[in-house]
Structure formats: C-alpha cells, structure tokens
Amino acid sequence: MLSSVELLVHKTKCITAVLLLTVVSTSLSAGEEPPLKAEPPGKPWRPYPELPDVLWYEDFETDSKLYGAGKIIEGAPAYSGKCMELGAHEHAKHEKLVWLEGKVNSTPLKIPGGLNPNAIFIQFMVWLEDSGEVRIKFKHAAGEYEEKVPVSKEKQWTPVICRFSDMRTKNGRPEAEHIAKSFEILFKPRDVKAYHKAYVDDIVITSTVRPPEILGALMSVRKAVVDLTKLPSKDGYAYSVQSQEVLKAIVKANKAKPRKPKSVLVMGARETDTQDLIKGLSAAAPKIKAMGFQFTPSAAPDESPAYGLEDMRTLLPSALLKENPEVVFLMLSAADALRPGRPSESVRVILERTLESGAIPVVCLPASAASLDKKEKPKVDGFINSVTSLCLQMSVPYIDAGVAIKSAQSPFEKIELSASGVESVATIAAQVFKHLDAFLFARKQG
Amino acid sequence: MRARTHLFSVLLSVSIYSCSLVAADVIFSEDFETLDFSKLPAGFSANGATDLSLADEAGKGKVLRINGKGNGWPSLSYTLDLNKVRGKKVRIAVAAKFPGAFTLLAGKDWARPKLQLVWKDKAGKDHYAEAVPEASKPDWQNLEASSLIDADAESAAVFIRVDLVAADVYFDTFVCDVDSAGGAPATPANPVPPANPVKPVVANPATPATPVKAGTTPAKVLTGPEAAAAKAPKQTLDDGGVIFSPELALALQKLVKPGATKNTFALVGPGLPIKELETKLPEKWTKVASTKETAGPLAHPRHLLAALPKFIAENKPEVVFIFGETVLGSRKVTHTEHFDWEDLARLCIRMGALPVLAVPAAQPADPKATEPKEDLRAVMIVAIGDANCPAIDLKSPSQIARRVAMVTDYFDKYVFCRVEPATATPGTVKKPDEE
C-alpha cells in the first residue's frame, strides 16, 4: 500500500508515461513525425495539484515507504487510524534520541527548490511520553540545518510548527537554491536515562500559507482520495488515485471518439462464465442502484461466442470496434494460468491494446482453488501475482476473485469458479462499474 | 514473450526427445526468468560472476548474457547428481545467440563460447560433449549435445561458458535431461561418441523444428493427407524464400475448418499494395477484394487486428497472406509488436482461414541511431515461430508473385490435398531457379 505522497509520485509517473504513449501513438497513427519541440518547463511537482501550496502531507494511514527509522502503528495514541512511532537513534544513544526520517529525494519535490525559505512552514503533531526537545532537521547535498522546539506537554497531541528559514547550523542557513534530500524529526527527552515513546502524525509542509490555514481544504482533498481508493482486501477490488488519473487521461485523449456510455463488454474465461456474469450483473446492478448499464457478451464476427485468453488476444480488438464499449470486463481463470508459456504476457498485451483503444479494462483475477494440485497451485498463484502487478503498473482496476467469493457457497467447480462463484464476482463487478461511473466518468449517481 | 520462450523450449525438447524415442527425465530446465545470481538454484554455480548478467530479449524475456573479457572462464554450471546420471545418456540443450565475433587463440581451438557436458571416468579422465554457437549470427541457435555417462563415473557437470576469449554471448532455455529407461537408447538416432565434441545443431528460429530427425522416422506407412503432407518440400526464408515443411503441412491440415470458400485467398496488411504482385496472381485461385481497413498503410497490425475478423467472416477466404511493410515510414516497431503479428496469424485460424506471413527485408541500420531499433523482419520471424505458420520473403520484389503462387500450390497439394503431389523426396528443398 502506498502512502499519500507515494501515491501521488507514482501517479505523476504513470500519467506522464500514458500521456507520452498517447501522444506518440496518436501522432504516429496519423502518419506524422513525433513532436521534436521541447515542452516548456512545467509547474513544480506538488502532491495535490489542486493545492499548489501544499508541498508535503502525511497522515500515515497507508504503509509508506518514504520514511525510515520509525514504525507506523495503529491505534492509541492516534485519535483514529495510524501514526508514526519514532525509533531509537543508533548514533545518539547517550541522548536517548528517537527519530524518523522522511526521504524527500524519493519524490519529485524540490524544497526549497527556488522557493523563499521564509515562506515555507513545517507543521506536525507530536505525542511525547516525557517532555523534552523536538528537533526538525533538513539535509541537502552540501550540508544540513535544524531548528529545536521545546515541548513541555506530555502524553497529549501537541502541534509543532516552524518556519524553514528559522533552521540554522554553525555553518549556514537555508538558501532558496538548496534542494533537500531528507528531513528528520528527532526527540530528545528531558530525562536521558531511558528512552521515552514519541509519536508523530499529520506532517504538513506548505509554502506561502501557514498549515492551519489550509488544513481544511487538505482534509477535504484527502477525504476524496480515501473515498476514491478501493482495496482488494477490504472492497474486493482495487482502484486508486493513480488509476483514476491515468484512466482519466485515456478517456480524455479519446474524447473525439466517445464510447457508448454505461456499456460494458463482458468476456468470460469460459463460454458459460460470460452468460453467468451477465445474469449476475443484471441482477446485482439494480440492487446497488447502478442503473442504466448495458452488459454485452463478447462474440466473434461470425456470431460464435468469444471467451478465454486466446480469444481476448485475437478477437477483443474487433469486439471493441464493433461494440464500442466504455468498459471491458475480462475474466481470467485458473486454466488461463495453467497455459504453457507465460500467460501474464498475454494479459499485458490485451490490456495494452484495450487501453490504446480508449476502453477501460476491468480484470477479474482467478481464484486459487483448494483442489489445485501441487504443480498447479504455484502456477496459478504466480499468475495471480503477475497479473496483479500488471494491473498496478498499468493502473487497471481489478477484482480479486479470491476475496469476492468469500461468502459464496461452493464457489468452485474443480479448479474453476462455479456458477455461484461467478455470481459473487458479478456482485463485486457491479460495484466496480458503479464506482467507475461515479468517479472516472463523473456521472451523477441517482 | 514467455509464450515464445516456451515454444522454443518445447521445440528444443521435442528435438531432444525425438533423437531416441525413449522417455526422458528432465534434470533441470532454466529459462532465466527468475534467476538470481545471489541465490542460485540448487546445483547451479556461477564462475566469473562479473561477466554474467541477465538481459531482456525481445520475444524471450530474460536471457543469460556472458560477456567474456578474454581473461577467464566465465560460466554458469550445474553439477549433476551422479546417482541420477550414472550409466545413462545425458542430453543438454540451450538456445544461444552470438551476434558478435571473437578471435580464435592460436593453438587453443577449444577457447570459445560453448555448451558443454564434462564427466570424469573412474580413471580420472575427463570426457566432453559440447556444442558451440556460430559467431556473427543475429538469430538464436539451438545447441545440443549428449553423452553416455559411465556407470562408475566420478563426477559430471554441465556448463554454458565463454573460455578465455573476449565474446558477448546470450543464452536461454538451458535444459538437461536423462533417459529414464537407463542405459543407451536401443536404437540411438545420433550415436555420440561420449568423448568427442558434438557438432552444433543450428536451426533457423523461423523454421519450425523438425520433430523427427533423418533416420529416426518411425517405420509407419503414411496414407491419405498425412502422406501428402510428408511429401511437402522443406524450405526456409534463407533457402527458397518460403517457410514450409512437411511438419507444417501436417499441422495446417489439422487447422482447416469447413466454411471457407474453396481456392480463395486474401491479401492484407500494411505492406500492400505491391505492384509486382497485383498483375501475377496465382492461377486457379481467386483473390478476395480487400478494403482500406485491411490493406494499405492504415492496416498496420493493431488496426488490422480489429478489422480482419469481420473481413474474414464476410469474405471467407481459405488463405490470408499478411504483408509487413517493406518501407516502415514513420511507424515504429514496438517491442511487443511480435504479439500483434502472431495474433493476426492466430485470428485467421480462429476465423477459419490459414495465414501466411509475408516478411519484408531487414531495414538498413541507422548509423545515427543511439539505441538498437526493433526490426520488423526480426519481429515477424518471431511471430511466425510462435504462430507456427508458413511465410514468404519479400526481399526480392520480382519473386513475390511467384512465392505467393508457390504457397497456394503447396496448400493445394499438401494441406487441402486437392492436387496429387508430384513424386518428390520428402523434406527436400526445392531450389528456386532465380536465386
């Protein structure tokens, strides 16, 4: 799971890649030379583009890889959710220092990076077992500087705020042209005989405005992110900010040739799956007020049903041309996983072609049945992992069939999903289509 | 990409197994997709690790690269369990690509890249079976070697290595197996003196592997379509400008579905129109009219994938020739394009038509290019191997019409079996009179 900052770093990379792909493919398909003219320098990277004054925000609600030294914990003393417990500092045992490190250089953020250090503010909440001194340190290529803030309140959340320009060392002070590699938040207890617990939450770095002035807007943006994000373990399917942004860019790039609204092309792993899925979707959609959807079974031009990985590779492009659907639901099976070679490469090609066509793929991963034998299980599990990674890389929403069928009775028929298993998948799929309708296609939900 | 790797591995295995027609146990099969030099699988060891790396190869996924600097013996080896190999015939195979060259060291002919099986007999004498890749070949080569290990052998190991010379070689699908029946095969097809080097078996990747080697054909009297297929000529792009063979004819026979209009063919793809072709179409065959979506610059692989199924469903051609572009223009070949060509061939089969890929000549290298570019010819050759379909070479424009006619003739004789094949030696290459 990515942190709020990480999500947005990844998002930026994905959008750039997809936009580049779109530009190149569009210009090449039109028989033109790719643009050689250099683009003007863009705006500096911000984690929330809609809030350009926010340079950094972390609420530790997701397991971030941007932090070192401390560990993310859930529950008390956090009011709700998670916070960061500072870790013991190896090189300052005599002071009983605890600390965390924020890896700024793992993000595109440049700080100060030309901004006036006097206009940059750092704020975070601390909870300290003992009173003491909180230090905020920034390191850049040529040195470091820090600010020390005494905190007298114990065992309660206390805000700490400082101005970037207030940080100092013997050798210097922040300059606008510096670029920070990392920041550290350290705590030195009053009583240095023993380590004392210290927790940090809600780190905000802003420019121009003070953090308290923008926290309301920030919380609102963050809430939208939380509403948009869906986790397979909790929701049965995956959708994220980066999926949203990448897919939005694709929808926008294909605005000239709009697709049939609320139309879903369904391609099952087996012929019966497609029929069962459509039956299940038609029943599940009204129950969650997902109205007006049209579910079409995939077929070859000779009217024979098209299903399975092989047909997804050969016949999906023509089905997309004929049906012009907004969304394509692709269901994969254990049999697909057990195909010779590397079937996940087939999935990659299928997703690449679908996204290039402007339709939005939704993948249903196979479920790993208990009846798989010793040779089959690693293959199926490996395939599930590979396709999951692919979907994450390509920002494609996916359903975890293993989670979707949890409450189904007899969800398997040998190694494949039974009709009741497929019905459970259809229930989650209906939620995915409704979610896409609300967030990606931004249609009002009635 | 893995599909291609697997196919290749299957072809290798088929070729190995067919040598003896006895059952074999695979000792290891390493495709390098997940190889980690820091945690090599049990039995494997690496020497000169700085010269060993994994490289991404279009159509193959991860491959092993040994970039020998000429000052050592970089290798990847596997120590065989003597309990499993004593008294048995051990066979090893690997796919190798050696596009560069190397300088032979005076008096050290053995110093070169190679696939090698080494075992020590009771008296301490080393015995070798090896195969060497040909240098300056951009295509993948299949290497294999085998040896009967003494029942009291002291040690045995297999290697892929670059000995003492500066050479940059790529390897994939490193396989070792042993006759499960034990002992030498009853009727060994290619008896290999254990101590002597085995001449490398070099196959054109574009050519479907021959499952049964000369001299090992089972004594079975072929009749009907099988007999017709067996009479098909064996040709390659380099030798005849057409990919066709008895095995391919037999495979195609099994793919024929009812419903196609007899003796009709379609010409599709971005490589059209070809003026030399339009005026000399095969006699007895009728061409289905193409559309701008299926022939011409708009019909590049991705567009054709979307347009071709409907076209085939409406026109029902028996054979579809799919032409790659001789001149690419501004279109760039992507690293996954071989999947598109492969799928074009497969979708023809799915829709009841038999595909023939028409492969353009290699694009001249761009001296200004900073990165190696994907070459359409190479990409299409990979697709032909993966789809296992016939092909024609577009290298000589004056020969294109003749090759189209030749292939339709082959289809008549060896696939649809409508015309009695002339008496011909099976598997012989019909030399083109113009080349």
Image (cartoon, coloured by chain):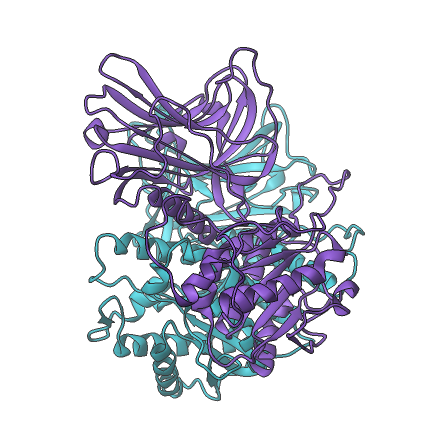
Q: How many marks?
A: 0
Vertical arrangement, residue B187 with respect to residue B155, above or below: below
Give the x, y percent position of residue A100. 43, 39
Give the x, y percent position of residue B161. 45, 25
Residue occupying image coordinates x 63% and y 39%? A165
Give the x, y percent position of residue A84. 38, 46
Q: Residue furthest right?
A: A37
Instruction: Give B212 or A200, whichever is nearer the viewer.
Output: B212
Left or right relative to A332: residue B119:
left
Instruction: Give B236 or B328, whichever is nearer the viewer.
Output: B236
Give the x, y percent position of residue B236. 58, 50
For residue A246, which quarter of the picture?
Answer: bottom right
Q: Can residue B283 be seen in this view?
A: yes
Q: Residue furthest front?
A: B423
Vertical arrangement, residue B193 with respect to residue B179, above or below: above
Residue occupying image coordinates x 79% and y 57%? A33
Q: Is residue A390 visible?
A: no
For residue A270, which quarter of the picture?
Answer: bottom left
Left or right relative to B251: residue B340:
right
Chain in purple (letter): B
Chain in cyan (letter): A
Left or right relative to B124: residue A17:
right
Vertical arrangement, residue B322 with respect to residue B196, above or below: below
Residue occupying image coordinates x 42% and y 44%? B214
